[in-house]
Amino acid sequence: MSRSTKKNGAVRNNRSSSATEKSSRPAFLAGLVIGALVTYIMPSMLTTDQKPSQAAVQDIVKKTDEETLKFDFYTLLKDNEILVPDDQQTSEEANQTDSSHYLLQVASFKNAQDAENLKVELLLLNLTADSEIVTSQNGDVWHRVIVGPFANTSKMASARARLAQNDMDSLLLKRKL
């Protein structure tokens, strides 16, 4: 298959371009020699023959001995006493006396079958799930998948962590009883 130069009007030059290029060996060798010289000369230029005087060393040692840190909070804590009133409740007791509980909304679907499928997945994660039907303001029917109820925040937090480990987002809901 020979090409006709009459159609294209261009002729290719198949000569090797290595004859016209300059060699880069001299530049490489010059850089290598300069690098070796710098590597040999620089360490001797960087070393110093100066030694610190004994007086300066002793001054530094004295300052560090004088400036030893003293922590007083150990003795202060022993001497202080904090009075806590007896009628103050712990946070868990306060949560139990509150007439509300916590729920986690995991998802909301328009299709009831999708909500049921997610409930099964949550049951496999050992979480009690339920779905509730909610009608929005514009008349759409949604099926919310809810985990809970939880009596206190620690149980809710552990369930939320389990959901997060399985790449499921949740929305915290607090409802009055």
Image (spheres, helix red, strand yellow):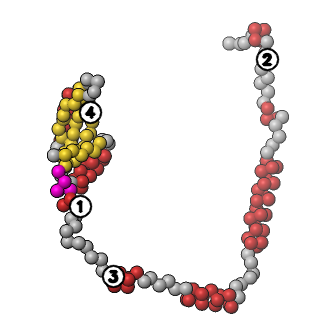
Q: Disc 4 to disc 2, how far (Cα)?
A: 71 Å
Q: Which mark is residue 11?
A: 2
Label 2: state its secondary structure.
loop
Question: Which amino acid type is marked by label 1?
Answer: Ser
Q: Residues within 10 Å of mark 3 (few under 14, many from 20)?
A: few
The magenta span reads 95-99
Residue 134, quarter of the rendered image: top left
139 left or right of 24?
Answer: left
Cβ atoms under marks 4 and 2 closer than 8 Å: no
User: Mark 4 or 3 closer to N-term?
Assistant: 3
Q: Residue at x 79, y 35 (%)?
A: 18
130 left or right of 54?
Answer: left
In front here: 86 or 127?
Answer: 86
Q: Disc 1 to disc 3, how far (Cα)?
A: 25 Å
Label 1: state its secondary structure.
helix
Q: Residues within 10 Å of mark 4 (few under 14, many from 20)?
A: many
Label 3: state its secondary structure.
loop
Measured as percent of width and height from the top left, residue 117 is found at 21, 33
Label 4: state its secondary structure.
strand
Q: Which mark is residue 91?
A: 1
Q: Nearer the viewer, mark 1 or mark 4?
A: 1
User: Mark 1 or 3 closer to N-term?
Assistant: 3
Residue 80, quarter of the rendered image: bottom left
